[in-house]
Image (cartoon, rainbow, N blue to C red):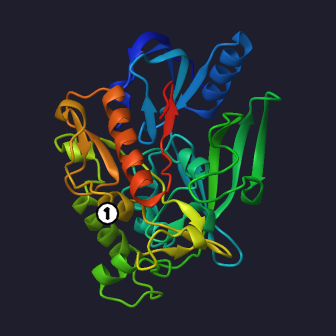
């Protein structure tokens, strides 16, 4: 465990992919799990607000900033262990860059995580959000996590994935802040093939039938190509990537509430369907590049599901645009959209 200085009044905007948000009253950088635990324990003991910040890729911070302590994870680590059944146990520190983890598994000749390539942020956030893309969610491969339980002040090791309430872009860890992820473990199949290609767009890009497998490295490059085409791979020079990724989740509704029988949808349990938020936004009349207040924020020029900072925006501008889109979809289809990123000190 290392000690790190406390920095007062640190701007949070440069630490987020949106590049929005005011300052933190205090910022502590935690290069290892022990430092993170001590910092969180001290903040809780003082009764002050606490924000755990990773890669800043799935968070919207208020213009007023955060009037408490921000603990920022900065240290990582990856370990592989072959198991008797031929699978591989992957253990990752919460502060490890997620795409670096995916790249490392592919470099090791291992499939499983390749469809989650190019997603910004840190590994500790993946079970919190049950991160998913192109037909794969981390819940399919997650074994367990190590947590710091803020209610009891204890570190809990090997908490099974089944205890985390993993669902579509959610878990029992999301929004409650009751526990901090310190370490994550995944079981990878042990071979070099990808997961079955479940997403039609990816299958078309690869030139295979849905359900097929390809070498993991091939699938990773195809996913990165698709994400770049949508402005979903971070690039400081590209304002389309100054976003929090997909701003709205795909809504899940009763089949009877599907607004258009001809629209694309996916099964979401008995009598329920998941609707594509991007389709709803487009058919509610919003086009790529649709501008918010003063043109300072806008929908991505490549992907209507991303709300972007064009360089001079504020969080208030972004939320105004989000409200406009949400209201447009509700008025046109009677469907409510819900934000995917965590809103800190602000609300829709």
Q: Nearer the viewer, residue 336 or 205?
A: 336
Res. 209 visible in picture? yes
Q: Residue at x 52, y 30 (%)?
A: 31
Judge whether 142 appears above or below 269 on screen: above
Judge whether 225 appears above or below 2 on screen: below
Q: Residue at x 56, y 63 (%)?
A: 252
Of all residues shown, which one is farthest toward the bottom? 209
Residue 178, percent from left and from top: 72, 34
Residue that label 1 marks: 283
Residue 224, percent from left and from top: 30, 64
Q: Residue at x 30, y 60 (%)?
A: 282
Residue 341, percent from left and from top: 48, 42
Q: How many marks?
A: 1
Query: Where, quadrant-wise, is the N terminus in this rendering?
Result: top right
Q: For mark 1, give the secondary structure.
A: helix
Crowding near pointer 1: few (<14 within 10 Å), some, many (20+)? some
Q: Nearer the viewer, residue 73 or 233?
A: 233
Q: Nearer the viewer, residue 10 or 239?
A: 239
Judge whether 170 appears above or below 62 on screen: below
Judge whether 304 appears above or below 114 on screen: above
Q: Residue at x 25, y 54 (%)?
A: 231
Q: Quadrant of residue 237?
A: top left
């Amino acid at each position: 465990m290392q000690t790190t200085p406390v920095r007062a009044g640190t701007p949070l905007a440069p630490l987020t992919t949106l590049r929005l948000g005011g300052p933190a009253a205090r910022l502590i950088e935690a290069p290892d799990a022990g430092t993170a635990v001590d910092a969180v324990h001290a903040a809780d003991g003082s009764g002050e607000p606490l924000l755990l910040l990773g890669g800043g890729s799935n968070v919207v911070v208020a213009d007023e900033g955060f009037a408490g302590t921000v603990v920022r994870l900065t240290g990582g680590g990856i370990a592989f262990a072959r198991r008797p059944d031929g699978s591989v146990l992957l253990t990752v520190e919460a502060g490890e860059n997620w795409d670096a983890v995916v790249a490392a598994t592919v470099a090791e000749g291992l499939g499983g995580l390749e469809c989650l390539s190019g997603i910004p942020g840190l590994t500790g956030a993946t079970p919190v959000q049950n991160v998913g893309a192109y037909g794969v969610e981390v819940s399919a491969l997650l074994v367990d996590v190590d947590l710091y339980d803020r209610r009891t002040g204890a570190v809990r090791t090997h908490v099974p994935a089944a205890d985390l309430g993993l669902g579509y872009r959610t878990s029992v860890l999301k929004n409650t802040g009751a526990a901090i992820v310190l370490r994550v473990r995944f079981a990878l199949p042990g071979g070099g093939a990808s997961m079955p290609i479940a997403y039609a767009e990816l299958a078309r890009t690869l030139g295979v039938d849905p359900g097929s497998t390809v070498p993991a490295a091939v699938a990773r490059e195809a996913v990165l190509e698709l994400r770049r085409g949508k402005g979903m791979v971070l690039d400081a020079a590209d304002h389309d990537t100054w976003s929090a990724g997909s701003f709205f989740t795909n809504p899940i509704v009763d089949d009877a509430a599907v607004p258009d029988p001809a629209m694309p949808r996916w099964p979401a349990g008995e009598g329920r369907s998941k609707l594509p938020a991007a389709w709803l936004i487009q058919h509610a009349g919003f086009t790529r590049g649709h501008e918010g207040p003063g043109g300072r924020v806008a929908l991505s020029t490549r992907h209507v599901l991303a709300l972007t900072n064009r360089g001079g925006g504020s969080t208030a501008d972004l939320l105004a645009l989000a409200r406009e889109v949400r209201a447009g979809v509700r008025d046109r289809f009677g469907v409510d959209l819900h934000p995917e990123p965590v809103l800190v000190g602000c609300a829709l």
